[in-house]
Amino acid sequence: MWFVVLGCLLSLLKLAGLTRVADWGWLWVLSPFAVAAIWWLIADAIGLTKQREADKERERVAARRERHLENMGLSFKNKRRGSTPGKPRVPTDER
């Protein structure tokens, strides 16, 4: 992603003609786009993209599971000492 942003920035500077980038050849200005394409090919080939997608999916499922358990009153995230696992805490009138 950073290479695409860099490529866009260099292209805009080249077209505007305001900086030293205007003197550069188009090959150098457009090279970040080629590097980005190569990076995406490598990332897809080694499974980095799929791994990130799977990690996001696992996090989403875990958050949903925790939310559902919390809504049912079965969340053991903040359980008291001495409570038995698997049983919901009984709410008390203490506030």
Image (spheres, rainbow, N blue to C red):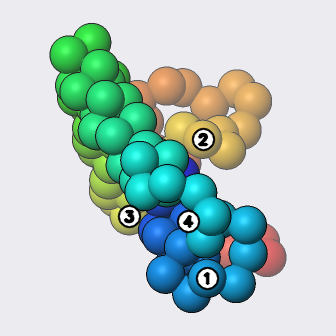
Give the camera-side residue of 46 and 72: 46
Q: Secondary structure at mark 1?
A: loop
Q: Earlier in the sequence, mark 4 or mark 3?
A: 4
- Amino acid type, residue under disc 1 in the picture: Gly
- Crowdedness of circle 4 by 10 Å Cα count: few (<14), some, many (20+)? many
- Crowdedness of circle 1 by 10 Å Cα count: few (<14), some, many (20+)? few
- Crowdedness of circle 3 by 10 Å Cα count: few (<14), some, many (20+)? few
In this view, the residue farthest toward the right is 95
Residue, disc 3: 71
Residue, disc 2: 77
Disc nearest the viewer among 2 and 1: 1
Measuring from the top left, give residue 9's x and y in whole percent. Answer: 56, 70
Measuring from the top left, give residue 42's x and y in whole percent. Answer: 29, 20
- Label 4 close to label 2 by CB (< 8 Å): no
Q: Residue at x 50, y 47 (%)?
A: 28
Q: CA distance from mark 4 to mark 3?
A: 51 Å
Q: Quadrant of residue 10?
A: bottom right
Residue, disc 1: 17
Q: CA distance from mark 1 to mark 3?
A: 60 Å
Give the camera-side residue of 71 and 80: 71
Q: CA distance from mark 2 to mark 1?
A: 59 Å
- Amino acid type, residue under disc 3 in the picture: Asn
Disc nearest the viewer among 4 and 3: 4
Disc nearest the viewer among 1 and 4: 1
The label on residue 62 is none
Q: Earlier in the sequence, mark 2 or mark 1?
A: 1
Residue, disc 4: 10
- Amino acid type, residue under disc 4 in the picture: Leu
